[in-house]
Image (cartoon, rainbow, N blue to C red):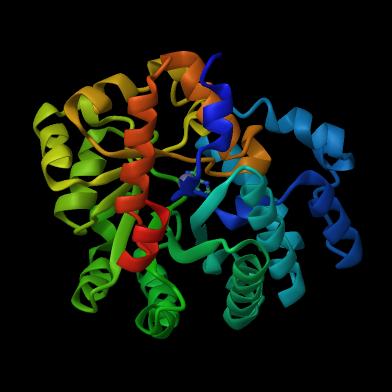
């Protein structure tokens, strides 16, 4: 379309991507070989890059995807594996004009298989420093609690990250993994403590589950940002509150289609959010699994909604002003 070049040239901010979700099939298989990790022999998907990509194109649900996501990341062992993973993402994001990225990681998925927390964090911190030096790209880490794991265990994972949340090595707390049946309110102990420490809070909500999970993330957990948040039209009062309080919804269009949360991007409530002034950003989620990075998500939204230059300018301005970087960095980006 006529805005394609503008969407390519636009400086972008990404708020919702999982570093472990940027593990491309070729790196996954290379790391499995190098680290002597046995991948499931009874699943032909792991036999080649092509068969992995073919399987990734047929996800039936969030849990169907998470099965592959958690197996894939078992190939990450050394600090340099984590550094390579994150640096490859920053490089790709830079090629798509991402100037600032706020990225999730899942320490529990690594400590649970005896990869030390410090190995994961130091690998990611090294990649962030290189991305700043090499590309001028700034980034922030957000630690996710895995909600399929009991809340008491998640609280221990939170306490392990707390010193780094307090020092600013990690910028915020998030909540991810299987949504239905794992209500936000179950994680109130961790979020209350984080709030007490002034830590920035977000949670995945309203992806597969209904809008009550979004209300809980805001009311029970104190989140100022919601990841996915596609169910807001089910609750017009809550929608008005997101607009009034400028609660950012970090949308991931290709992810929602690939995980069958919607049949097509045109079903997403993007027009409603623009009309009601609910701030949202457009993001890649797990780009190695969902067939595109941020640029492909921007283009898919444009194809479905044919937004104006002014509407795009507004999306990007909101993406900057509602970022978790410092005010000086926002001024540079605006
Ligand atoms: C995720 Cl798409 C999605 N939803 C929930 N949790 C996740 N972790 C990684 N990707
Ligand atoms: Zn996500």
Instruction: Give the residue drawn at x 31%, y 44%.
Output: 318
Taking the image as shown, residue 247 lies to the left or right of residue 240, namely right
Taking the image as shown, residue 291 lies to the left or right of residue 153, namely right
Q: Quadrant of residue 154?
A: bottom left
Taking the image as shown, residue 284 lies to the left or right of residue 73, namely left
Q: Nearer the viewer, residue 32 or 14?
A: 14
Instruction: Give the residue drawn at x 62%, y 29%.
Output: 59
Instruction: Work out whether residue 78 can be spotted.
Output: no
**Percent position (x, y) of residue 8?**
58, 33
Instruction: Give the residue drawn at x 62%, y 34%.
Output: 290
Taking the image as shown, residue 78 lies to the left or right of residue 310, namely right
**Percent position (x, y) of residue 140?**
47, 65
Task: Please determine whether, in this image, residue 177 is positioned above or below residue 257.
Answer: below
Instruction: Give the residue drawn at x 51%, y 37%.
Output: 62
**Percent position (x, y) of residue 176?**
43, 52
Question: Where, quadrant-wise, is the N terminus in this rendering?
Answer: top right
Q: How many marks?
A: 0
Task: Please determine whether, in this image, residue 299 is positioned above or below residue 136.
Answer: above
Q: Quadrant of residue 152?
A: bottom left
């Amino acid at each position: 379309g006529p805005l394609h070049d503008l969407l390519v040239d636009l400086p972008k901010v990404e708020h919702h991507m999982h570093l472990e979700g940027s593990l491309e099939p070729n790196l996954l298989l290379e790391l499995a070989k190098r680290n002597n990790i046995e991948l499931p022999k009874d699943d032909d998907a792991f036999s080649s890059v092509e068969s992995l990509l073919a399987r990734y194109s047929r996800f039936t649900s969030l849990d169907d995807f998470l099965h592959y996501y958690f197996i894939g990341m078992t190939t990450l062992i050394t600090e340099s594996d984590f550094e390579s993973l994150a640096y490859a993402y920053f490089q790709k994001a830079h090629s798509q004009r991402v100037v600032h990225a706020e990225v999730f990681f899942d320490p529990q998925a690594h400590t649970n298989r005896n990869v030390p927390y410090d190995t994961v964090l130091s690998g990611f911190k090294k990649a962030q420093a290189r991305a700043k030096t090499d590309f001028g790209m700034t980034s922030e880490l957000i630690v996710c609690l895995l909600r399929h794991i009991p809340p008491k265990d998640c609280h221990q994972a939170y306490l392990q990250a707390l010193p780094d949340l307090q020092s600013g090595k990690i910028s915020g707390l998030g909540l991810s993994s299987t949504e239905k049946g794992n209500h936000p309110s179950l994680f109130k102990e961790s979020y209350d403590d984080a709030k007490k420490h002034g830590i920035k809070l977000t949670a995945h909500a309203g992806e597969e589950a209904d809008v009550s999970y979004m209300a809980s993330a805001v009311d029970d957990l104190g989140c100022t940002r919601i990841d996915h948040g596609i169910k807001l039209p089910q609750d017009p009062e809550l929608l008005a509150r997101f607009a009034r309080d400028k609660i950012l919804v970090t949308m991931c269009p290709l992810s929602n289609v690939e995980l069958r949360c919607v049949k097509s991007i045109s079903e997403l409530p993007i027009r409603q959010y623009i009309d009601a002034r609910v701030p949202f950003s457009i993001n890649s989620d797990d780009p190695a699994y969902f067939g595109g990075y941020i640029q492909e998500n921007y283009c898919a939204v444009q194809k479905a909604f044919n937004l104006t230059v002014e509407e795009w300018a507004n999306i990007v301005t909101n993406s900057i002003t509602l970022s978790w970087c410092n005010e000086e960095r926002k001024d540079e980006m605006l």
